[in-house]
Structures are given as C-alpha cells and as structure tokens.
Amino acid sequence: MKIGFYPGCSLTGSSREYNESVVALAKALDIELIEINDWNCCGATAAHVMNEELSLSLPARIMALAEAQGLTEVVVPCAACYNRLKVTQHELEDETKRSSVVEILKLPYKGDLKIINVLQMLEAYGTENIKARVTHPFAHKVACYYGCLLVRPHSILKFDRVEDPQSMDSLIRGIGGTALDWAFKTECCGAGFSVSRTDIVAKLSGNVLKDAYERGAEALIVACPLCQSNLDMRRGAINKSLETPIDIPVIYITQAIGLALGIGAKELGLKRHFVTVEL
Amino acid sequence: MTENKNKVSDLQSHTGVEVMRCYQCGKCTAGCVLASEMNFPPSYVMRLLQTGSKENYDKVISSNSIWLCLNCENCLGRCPMEIDIPKMMDYLRTQSISENKLHPDSKPILAFHQSFLNSVKYTGRLYEVGLILDFKLRTFRLAQDIAIAPSMYLKGKLHLLPERIKDRMSMKRIFAKTIETAKTTHP
C-alpha cells in the first residue's frame, strides 16, 4: 500500500516521536509513505483566528502540491492539520472562495484529494491484519483520548461517532489491550493555549487525566500532538493544579501498536516523553 | 439600532450564522469547557446578539468570551439547530480587532498567534524556538518555560535552527494577498 504523507510542523519538532512511530509502524506494515514535496504549515488555529483567506490558502497550497505530485490519498497524523485540510477542502467547494484562493496561490487546485487521519490509515490496513502481526500483546488497561479535532465538526469530517468514538478503542482491543469506558474521550485539553494560557491547559488537561486515572487507566492513548504535548510536557503544571499528582504516561496509538508488533522503544520515540513510559 | 442590525446581518453574510435561530436551550454553555471563565457563556453571547442593540453587540466584541473560545467545537456538535458558533467566534474576533475593542485577556492569545504566523511567513513552517522567543518579547514573559526548555532540548524536541521551505516567495505572496491587505493586520 502506497500513500501520500503530510507530517506537519509538530511532527518535525516537539512531537518528533509521533513522526518516528508513524514511520516505524508504516515500515513494519509495508505501507509506503510518500511525503508531499516542499509542504508548508497548515496555519493551525493562528491562521483561522486571524484571517479566513489565509487559513484557507495555506492548506490549499499543501493540497495543490500533493495533487501536482500525482497523489490521490494523503495521511495526516496530526489531528489539527487533518482538521484544517478537511475543513479547507469543504470550504473551497464554494466557487467564489476557490477561485480567489487559486488566484492567490497561482497553482491549479482540484479539491479531490482523499485526506485521512492515522486511525483511518490503520483501519484501511485492517485491524485483523494488524492482529495477525502481534508478537507482544499490549496487555494494558488504557483510556483512548480522541480530543476535539479528530471528530469535530462531524458534518465535515464524517469520522467516527462524535460523542463516543470507537476506532482507537477497537485498534487497542486488536492488539490485546483493554479500552476503558470513560467520560472525557472528546473533551478539549486546552489545545493551542499551551503557551499563552498554560493555567487553562493545566486545568482542562488535569480534568481529562484525572478521569482516566480514577477509572484505572495505565496510560492514555492519543492520536494528536497537541493533546500529547499538553498532557505530557505540561504534566508539571497539571500536577500543581491537582490534589494528588498523576504519573500515568500518554502515548500515541502508533507507539502502542508498534510495541505490540515488537518494534523497539527507542525506534518508536518512547524515550522522548516527559512522563516515563514503562509499558 | 440600524447600525447593529447591519452588524448582525454582516455576521450572517460572512459566516452563514442566523442568530435568531437560537432558542436558548443552553446545551452549548453546558458543554463549553471554558464557560465558567467567560464574561458571557456561549448561549448568553447568542442572546446578546439577538437583542439587536449596539450596546450588546459591543459588549460581545469587548468581552473575553470570544478570546477564550478554543474552537473545540463542542457547542456546534451539540447544538440542536447546528448553529456554527465557532465560525461566528472567528468572525467576532476579527471585528473586535478592527474596531479596537480588545479585552485585556486577548493580549497573550493574540501575541501567540502573531508569533506563530510570523514564523510561517518567513520560513513556511512553524519554527518553535523562534515562536517562543518572539512570544516572550511580545509579552515580556521572559522567564516562561525556562524550566522545561533544557529537557526539551535533551529529548531532541527543540530544533535550534528553522526548517525552511524552498518556495518561500509563495508564503510572502499568500500573506501579502490575505492578512496583510485585510484591516485586521495590526491588533
């Protein structure tokens, strides 16, 4: 299986372990990732808060480049990038918006690229096929945390259930783990306030972590670099806001599956987390 | 009164949001993770806009509510009328900037967005070290995150030099033709 690949900025910097685990897992599953040439930042929250046309033009350039490269399907592991690309594609169905963006970009844009997140890539590969390759069953109780951007807005993303998504839970069961039923699957972690309002991130991420911990989770499983860095890198600030400090790790779904397939902790970037991972 | 009616219809023509469709069930406020920190929670913002007075419109764009909104989209996900409150919040923020009615809580949030976009404009990608330094200079929060920076570096999470895309001219052009020609450029 061959598929286009948009890593996005976080995966080249503070969340490089997500990139490492996506690449290692794809290799183990014989999925060939073809990176989009000269890709740029999707603009994230900053662009759509500041200027609508900018927030559409940045993702449109990425998709135009992918189209020019002959790609038909692109996997976007970062939930924020995935969301921006999908929303842009939807907004650019409007003829006026599309022609004004094409005029800015000076690149042809068709808008028929299939954009998928990492969970969809793994689902397409097949839970059964992954199961068949498990050498080290992931015998842990975990809370699968989807956050906001993977599932909302449902009318555009059309991915999984909006209040109680299941795709990550079933991948976890496929590798021998137990996915707990819990209440904060799709509550916001504080997202882009990590730097500007760390106090808010500490409070919101604290709520998420506390519920998972109280239900007996040994780890949180995520598919978004913003969620991961808020829950892991901001653990010091979170624990200051909690009565009792919590030390369960937060790992990517690609790392959990990688471990089950016998890929080494170092190759999966598990040494780069702030909260030590002993799973 | 007339002026505000125009503002609410401007809001509708830019975002497609019809404020009168809200029947005040309060599900948005119940699901909003930051409702308790806001001057007015989301359903209250809707009600203020529905009243049609200029005073209430100004209250909304001068409030911290529009800046604290994280665009997590829980409100939209649960709204029985599928009113796109997050899209409306984006629009109200640009109005707050252009009418210079910024709530003090907007300062660090706007500074972060400005620093972020600066990095994208010059390199085509997010340069995290540059973003943090730029943010510190804008907000004078010089000591922030000093404690975690060394571990980030040791864990290989900080690139000291930026990654640059080849076609940086395209970034210049995109910025020049969008945010730099809009009146919302300088908050």
Image (cartoon, coloured by chain):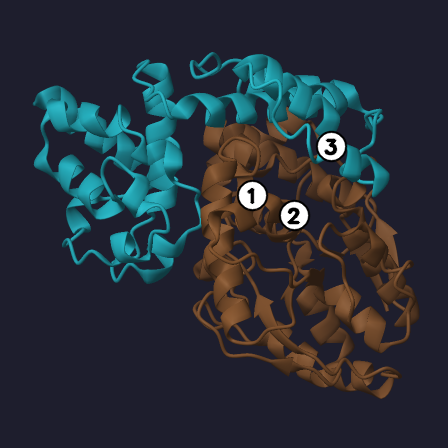
Mark 1 surroundings: few (<14), some (14-19) or many (≥20) residues within 10 A: some
Q: Give the percent coordinates (x, y) of residue A188.
A: 47, 53
- Three-letter amino acid code of the residue under disc 3: Ala
Point out the frontmost of discs 2 and 1. 1
Give the labeled residue for mark 1. Answer: A237
**Could you say which is closer to the camera, residue A209 or residue A9?**
A209
Give the labeled residue for mark 3. Answer: B149
Q: Give the percent coordinates (x, y) of residue A275.
A: 71, 55
Mark 3 surroundings: few (<14), some (14-19) or many (≥20) residues within 10 A: some
Q: With respect to residue A253, does A53 lie above or below?
A: above
Q: How many marks?
A: 3
Cα–Cα span, label 2 and label 1: 12 Å
Q: Residue at x 76, y 70 (%)?
A: A256
Label 3 secondary element: helix
- Three-letter amino acid code of the residue under disc 1: Ala
Label 2 secondary element: helix
Give the labeled residue for mark 2. Answer: A229
Q: Residue at x 34, y 34 (%)?
A: B66
Q: Chain of mark 3?
A: B
Q: Give the percent coordinates (x, y) of residue B175.
A: 61, 20
Task: Mark 2 or mark 1: name the one nearer the start of the chain.
Answer: 2
Work out whether disc 3 and disc 2 sit on a shared chain: no
Cα–Cα span, label 3 and label 1: 14 Å
Chain drawn cyan in the picture:
B
Using the rendered image of the protein, determine whether residue A99 is visible from the camera's viewpoint: no
**Mark 3–mark 1 CB contact (< 8 Å):** no
**Mark 3–mark 2 CB contact (< 8 Å):** no
